[in-house]
Image (cartoon, helix red, strand yellow):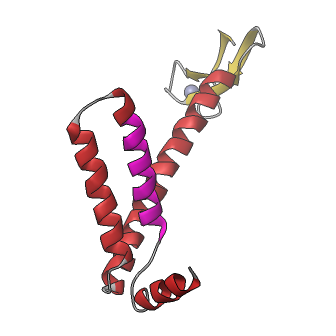
Amino acid sequence: MSQFRERFSRFMIGRYGSDKLSRFLMGTVFALIFVGIFIRSYWVDIAALFLIALSYFRMFSKNIGKRFEENQKFERISFRVTEFFKKLRFKFQQIRQYHIYKCPSCGQKIRIPRGKGKVSVHCPKCSTDFIKKS
Ligand SMILES: [Zn+2]
């Protein structure tokens, strides 16, 4: 067994190995296998096999610069996606906790905490006062 490991580590010299993108690909493969339990379509299997092949290709690749670049690209995209969902979550929390009212005279958006009964709202932009239920 240790001989196998030694041979394997020798085999991996100069090869790219695992990164965040390959872990994501493998995660997607597991998700596809899980989906495949419910949706019996060979397209799911083909997609899973393709992703397995792709992640092995990347792991054993000797073009390290190119693979590194792919991973960088992936990390940029995944950062943007997580930021998008963070913002969305923040928006939902705001909606749960606050009413957003527009000032009737200037249209400025004003955030009022919910559940305080009738409140007088003072617009910070044009100093108009108006009454709203919070
Ligand atoms: Zn105003």
Q: Tell me residue 73's x, y (percent).
A: 37, 68
Horizontal relation, residue 121 to residue 22: left or right: right
Residue occupying image coordinates x 30% and y 72% = 57
Res. 113 in view: yes
Extent of the magenta region: 19-35
Regarding residue 122, the answer to whether it shows in the image is no
Ligand 1 lies in which image quarter? top right
Q: Residue at x 39, y 64 (%)?
A: 74
Q: Which sits in the foreground, 104 or 59?
A: 59
Residue 109, quarter of the rendered image: top right
Q: Could you say where residue 112 lies in the image, as x and y percent from the top left?
A: 68, 23
Residue name at image x 52 percent, y 37 percent: 88
Image quadrant assignment for residue 134: top right
Which is the main secondary structure of the residues drawn in magenta? helix
Q: Nearer the viewer, residue 108 or 53?
A: 53
On the picture, is 80 further left or further right than 60? right
**Label total for image:** 0
